[in-house]
Image (cartoon, grey):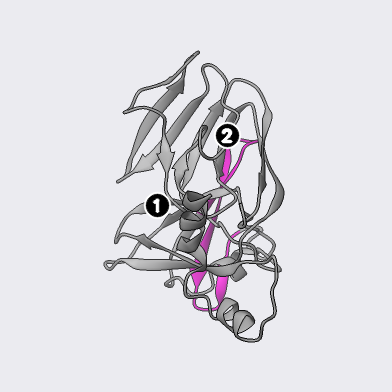
Amino acid sequence: MMRTKTLILTAVLGAASVAAAVAQSVYSVNAVGFVNKTVKAGQFALLANPLNLPDNTLAAVLPDVPVNTKVYEYDAATGAFSIYTKRATGWTGTGAATAKLNPGEAFFIQNVGTADFNVTFVGEVPQGTLTTPIAQGFSLIASQVPQAGTIQTQLGLPAQTNDKAYLFVDGNYQIFTRRASSWTGGTGEPAVGVADGFFYQAVAAGTWTRSFSVNQ
């Protein structure tokens, strides 16, 4: 219980709306806050939106990234990426106006500039029964909640024998394979940080389902 609350505070600590609610003695099951992630100059990062907005469109989730930033959204059905580019007037690219970055769906973001920048995710912590589809073959996925941990034991991913996880670290992939009783290819079971995405290669389609509450 304490560990879960500590991890969730990564997202909710300092949220003005939470402080205001407490001051007025108005209590809610909703937890609202923010998560910051740094994208290094000239590099890609594999991220995921861990908080819900009323509308998780590309423009709503990433309103303030620098001009010329690119986002690559993967389609598991076709194996292709949709590429969106931030311009001074907004996001461009086929489908950019309706593209969504929902919790559980990871994406690549490219910093084409010469200085690091921060991505700030803002919204509500997803709660209740949360489901993320896993395609047979490759999917680009993430935890739906702002929690760090090992993907199977702590975050509840239903890994099957011979599934593979590809973590993107400093521009390279670390590849882990699920065996009958353990993970191989790294230093144990793969672990991700808050708002980190990863490629997952599943031997069969499935669903990543969690029941989650910030009060757990």
Residue drawn at (68%, 55%) of the image = 127
Crowding near pointer 2: few (<14 within 10 Å), some, many (20+)? some
Q: Which residue is mark 2?
A: 157
Residue 17 lies, with reference to residue 36, above or below; the image says below
Q: x and y percent of residue 109 in the render?
A: 45, 56
Quadrant of res 135: top right
Q: x and y percent of residue 86 in the render?
A: 50, 68
Residue at disc 2, secondary structure:
loop
Q: Is residue 216 left or right of residue 151?
A: right
Quadrant of res 126: bottom right
Q: Is residue 116 left or right of residue 143?
A: left
Q: Is residue 172 left or right of residue 134?
A: left
Q: Nearer the viewer, residue 196 or 60?
A: 196
Residue at disc 1, secondary structure:
strand
Crowding near pointer 1: few (<14 within 10 Å), some, many (20+)? many
Choose mark 1 or mark 2, whichever is in front.
2
Cα separation between marks 1 and 2? 22 Å
Q: Is residue 109 left or right of residue 16?
A: left
Residue 147 lies, with reference to residue 137, above or below; the image says below
**Quick one: label 1 or label 2, which is nearer the N terminus?**
1
Residue drawn at (44%, 22%) of the image = 177
Q: Which residue is mark 1?
A: 45
Most extreme residue toward the left is 114
Residue drawn at (47%, 50%) of the image = 3
User: Which span is picked out in magenta?
Assistant: 72-93
Residue 101 painted magenta = no
Residue drawn at (52%, 67%) of the image = 12
Q: x and y percent of residue 159 in the render?
A: 56, 26
Q: Nearer the viewer, residue 202 or 36?
A: 36
Q: Amino acid at mark 1?
A: Ala
